Image (cartoon, helix red, strand yellow):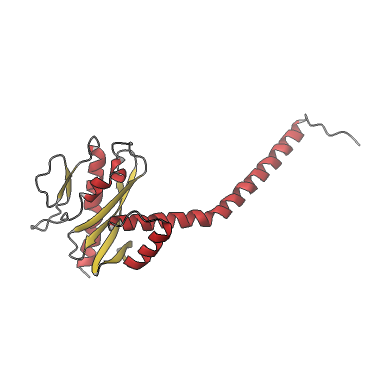
Amino acid sequence: MSKLNTNSNAYIIIYSAVLVIIVAFLLAFVYQTLKPMQDANVALDIKKQILYSLNIRGLDGQEAEAKYADVVKSEEQTGGQTYYVCDINGQKKYVFPLKGMGLWGGISAFVSVDDDLNTIYGAYFNHESETAGLGAEIKDSQEWQEKFQGKKIYGDDGQMAINIVKKVENPASEVDVVTGATLTSNGVRDMLRDGLKPYIDQLRNK
C-alpha cells in the first residue's frame, strides 16, 4: 500500500475542500441556531423604538414587551405601509415608520402623532452611518428628539409646515438643526415631510 503523499497537489486540494465544507457547515449550523434569538432581538428593538416615539423610555426587555402589548392596540395598513394605533392614557396616538437618506446613508424614524393627525406627540430617529457627535446626534440626543414634541405638521393654511432650520422663527412647527450636521438635518426634514404626508392624507380620507 503506497504512502499518502501529503505534499501532492491532489491532497492539498482535497484537504482544503473538506475543510471549507466543514467550516461552512459549522457556520450554517451556528447561524440557524442563533437566528431565532437574533430575530427576537430585532423585533424587541423595533418595539422599543416605537415606545421611544411615544416618550416611553428606560425599560428593560421584559418591561418593554409588556408595555408594548399594553399601549399598541393594532398594526394597520394604508397604501401598503404599516402604522401603529396606540392608546396613551386613553388618548389615541398613531405611530408612523419613516425612512430617508442622511449624509452618509439611510436614516429612519418612528413618529407618533395625536388623533388630530397634525400634532407630533413624540419622535425617535435612527441612522446607519452618520458621523459620531454630529449627524449621529439625531439618534444619540434625546434632548433633540424631544424638541419635536407638540410641533405642528401642517400650518393654518393647510400647507406642510414641519421644518428643521438654522434659526427658528416659527416655534409651532420648526426645530433647530443639529449643530454641525446641516445635511443630515435636511435629510430628517425631507423624511418627515415626504413620509408623514401619505399616511395623513390616506387616514384623513378614510
Residue in the picture at 36% in, 40% down: 129
Nearer to me, 79 or 162 = 162
Rendered location of residue 153, percent (x, y): 17, 55
Residue in the picture at 34% in, 41% down: 105
Rendered location of residue 51, percent (x, y): 32, 58
Nearer to me, 36 or 141 = 141
Give the vertical position of 91 relative to 108 (above or below).
below
Give the vertical position of 150 relative to 130 (above or below).
below
Residue in the picture at 45% in, 54% down: 41
Which quadrant does the C terminus fall into? bottom left
Residue 104: tell me if it is visible.
Answer: yes
Nearer to me, 130 or 17 = 130
Figure quadrant of residue 116: bottom left
Give the vertical position of 164 relative to 3 (above or below).
below
Figure quadrant of residue 71: bottom left
Residue 72: tell me if it is visible.
Answer: no
- Left or right of 120, for residue 43: right
Which quadrant does the N terminus fall into? top right
Rendered location of residue 72, percent (x, y): 33, 66
Rendered location of residue 125, percent (x, y): 30, 49
